[in-house]
Amino acid sequence: GPASVSSEIVLPAAIALRQELSQAVADLSFCELAASAQWAAELSVALPPSPAVDGDMAARPADPCRGITSGKLYSSVMLAKTHFSMREYGRAAHALQGFKDLHKCPQALFLRLYALYLAGEKRREEETMEVADPAEKCQVRNAELKGIEELLAALHGQQALDGLGLYLYGITLRGLEMMEEARRILLKSVRAFPCNWSAWLDIIATCSDLNDITDLRRSCAEAPNHWMAWFAQAALDIECQRNEEAFTIYSALRRFFPDSSHILSQIAACQYNMIDFDLSQSSFEEVRKRDPYKLTSLDTYSNILYVKEDSASLSNLARQAVKIDKYTPEACCIIGNYYSLKGEHEKSVTYFQRALSLKRNFTPAWILMGHEYMEMKNVPAAIDAYRTAVNINQRDYRAWYGLGQTYELLNLHFYALFYYRRAMTLRPEDARMWCAMAECYNHMDRKFEAMKCYEKAYLCGDRERMALPRLARLQQELGDRRKAAYWYTMVVQSASPGPGPLRASGSGLSTEVIEALRFLMSFYREEGKREECELCANQLLDTAGPGKDEAKAMLRDLRSASDGRGGYPAFVGAPESSRASRR
């Protein structure tokens, strides 16, 4: 359970964590792995203060250049690093060309091959942008991968690769779509260098479907017995929509890293996935206070403001994002959400496209763009956007759910059901997935399966209260009025916060409750239950429309029946036993 997991999480003392993270930052920065270095540095700063170390020179990290003995090689490495800073990857690789036995200096070898890898990635992205056909886009490859893989495979066979060398070998294999081998090498990499966060993320990314996730769980059991494995486990849990487990781990890790904006933003993401928007919003607001210039994950925060229709806060967030850095995918998504809330869907699509021009594989932008195309009734473009999102990340239920909605809009319910099932597999406790499947079954005239799905949706919480009224209608269509009455009673009870008049959101009764009361009023009269019938009718008097007229007519009938029968009502269609008991 969550409590047992929390008690299992024991990390080294803050002094040891700071030393390990500081060394990792130095090594990762030297090898130009900026994202991993930033992650480790943020985590180091998030540790509680330890005065004994803060003034201790012995705690400083070792020099990453310690393995470079040749002055010429050292100068060439420094030149390559300057080229890296200028994003001139071809020049960086060329600066380290021509050295014999470069593999004897792991840092220099890594910089040369990583520069080649990035140069190939840059060219691949440029070529992808020039290709119009989506099928051809998928065929564009990094031309440097094969040569890098051959060299690293030979060194791996000689056991000559360190942790970062193994990481480069792993991402090269991943680029060549050799996923099983890539995962195996990346696991070896994190055993050798556990603080390389990018390696852990790439291990998760090698999984393409749920079967791979199961295999990865076994692989993670073979991962090093290191505190970084808890961060990887929590990230994997979020990826698998095991949000409660992830929340438990992050909450426990927060005790050791109390000032971590990363952990707090991950907690906010868990709360968002659990549809607890108020708590998630509070967590994101705390992240913004602690790290006001951080844009990572704020696209999720903008989704919350969008759903809550908080246009003032979303407008303010969009302005802040533009001030910080408007040329980031997160900022573009925030602005896109703002325009979508204003109903300017064409403008919104423009910003989501801009986000994708900055980061082609940014799944949230593809999904949000699909939503916008749906609003614009451009179904083919929506399908294309959702399919691209699925190709990037098959574990994102929103893309599968979006595909289901598009095919449902086209009245292709069999196809819609396939995509909704995929979404349900990823989110089995989400009532929306079950309701969507039930609607498809209903349109396919498979009433029994539809009822089972609605029942499951009700058991899963059904925050949107769709399942109960639809269950009742299905039972009514099937002619089982007693079961229909049971579900309609549940509709009325679920709409009532407590004893007293049954009202929904303080502004009269909801459409579903009015429908339920109208049915129950008629049903109770047939069953000979005057008090219940009268109670339903009295509540309908507070409504407008045909329900009010029916209630007035029913009360008149009840009064006239009572007056004409010596104070006892005669109910049309009531069972003989009911009438007999009232004589």
Image (spheres, rainbow, N blue to C red):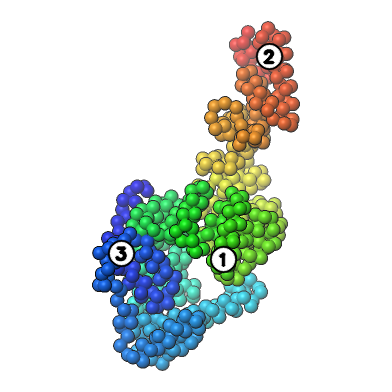
Circle 1: element type: helix
Is residue 250 shown above or below 450? below
* Amino acid at the residue labelled 1: Lys
**For the point 60% across and 27% down, which residue is it?**
501
Q: Residue at x 29, y 56 (%)?
A: 10
| Lower sequence index among marks 1 and 2 | 1
Is disc 3 placed on a helix, strand or loop? Answer: helix
Closer to the camera in the image, 581 or 246: 246
Mark 1, residue position: 323
- The one nearer the camera, 510 or 571, is 510
For disc 2, the marked residue is 570
> Does 491 sit above or below residue 525?
below
Indicate the position of residue 106 as horizontal and vertical percent values.
35, 81
Three-letter amino acid code of the residue under disc 2 = Ala
- Quadrant in which residue 300 is drawn: bottom right
Alpha carbon separation for disc pair 1 and 2: 74 Å
N-terminal label among 3 and 2:
3
Q: Nearer the viewer, mark 3 or mark 2?
A: 3
Residue assigned mark 3: 17
Residue in the foreground of this view, choosing between 15 and 249: 15
Find out whether the residues at labels 1 and 3 contact each other: C-beta distance under 8 Å.
no
Dots 3 and 2: beta carbons under 8 Å?
no
The mark closer to the camera, 1 or 2, is 1
Whether residue 271 is visible, yes or no, is yes
Q: Callout 2: helix, strand or loop?
A: loop
Disc 3 marks which amino acid? Leu
- Measured in 3D between alpha carbons, the distance from the residue under mark 3 to the one under mark 2, in whole angstroms, is 81 Å
